[in-house]
Image: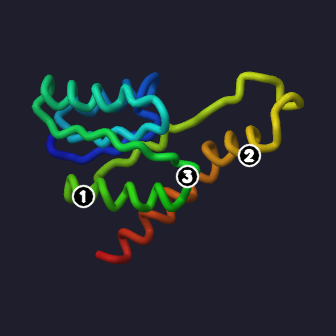
């Protein structure tokens, strides 16, 4: 993975953070995407210094296609390319579905499903421009 550029969504903790760290350990430069847990900012700094790679954290709501497209552009601007994209972001409302509001349900589904479509669209736009 030396000198590859890897984007990991949901990279503030859990599986996403573990993937980002493994990529950094393998020599990849890493873009950590997070929504609300800004621990990713400090993790990016740590990965950069510990593994001698470039690591940057970006706050991105992956359920919003415009944020995804803008963030893809920012990563390419900062790193020059994207070699690997790990679509790991997810969320869960910790209550039974019948107790969820319609807004909670829509947000959860948009993170899980629409985010992948937004990323696909953003990458298609980027690839067709080169």
Which residue lies under the disc numbered 1?
A: 81
Examine the rendering and report whether any part of residue 23 can be seen.
Answer: yes
Quarter of the image containing the C terminus? bottom left
Q: Relative to residue 91, is residue 59 drawn left or right?
A: left
Q: Comparing marks 3 and 2, which lies closer to the viewer?
A: 2
Q: Secondary structure at mark 1?
A: loop
Image coordinates of residue 40 in percent, x first then y, are 35, 30
Between the residue at mark 1 and the residue at mark 3, the CA separation in whole angstroms equals 19 Å
Between the residue at mark 3 and the residue at mark 2, the CA separation in whole angstroms equals 15 Å
Image coordinates of residue 114 in percent, x first then y, are 62, 53
* Outermost right residue: 98
Image coordinates of residue 24 in percent, x first then y, are 23, 31
Mark 2 surroundings: few (<14), some (14-19) or many (≥20) residues within 10 A: few
Q: Relative to residue 21, is residue 113 drawn left or right?
A: right
Ranked by sequence position, the earlier of labels 3 and 2 is 2
76 over 87 or under it: above or below: below
**Residue 97 lies in what quarter of the image?**
top right
47 over 129 or under it: above or below: above
Q: Secondary structure at mark 2?
A: helix
Q: Secondary structure at mark 3?
A: helix
Quarter of the image containing the N terminus? top left
Ranked by sequence position, the earlier of labels 2 and 1 is 1
Instruction: Residue at 44% x, 68% y: name it.
Output: 124
128 over 114 or under it: above or below: below
Instruction: Residue at 29% x, 52% y: name it.
Output: 83
Between the residue at mark 2 and the residue at mark 1, the CA separation in whole angstroms equals 32 Å
Mark 1 surroundings: few (<14), some (14-19) or many (≥20) residues within 10 A: some
Nearer-the-camera pick, 27 or 49 = 49
Which residue lies under the disc numbered 3?
A: 116
Which residue lies under the disc numbered 2?
A: 106
**Residue 13 lies in what quarter of the image?**
top left
């Amino acid at each position: 993975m030396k000198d590859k550029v890897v984007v990991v969504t949901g990279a503030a903790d859990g599986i996403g953070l573990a993937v980002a760290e493994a990529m950094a350990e393998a020599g990849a430069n890493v873009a950590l995407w997070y929504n609300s847990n800004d621990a990713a900012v400090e993790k990016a700094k740590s990965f950069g210094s510990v593994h001698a790679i470039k690591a940057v954290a970006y706050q991105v709501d992956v359920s919003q296609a415009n944020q995804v497209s803008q963030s893809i552009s920012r990563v390419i601007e900062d790193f020059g390319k994207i070699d690997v994209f790990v679509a790991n972001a997810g969320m869960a409302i910790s209550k039974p579905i019948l107790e969820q509001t319609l807004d909670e349900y829509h947000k959860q589904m948009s993170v899980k499903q629409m985010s992948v479509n937004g990323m696909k669209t953003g990458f298609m736009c980027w690839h067709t421009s080169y």
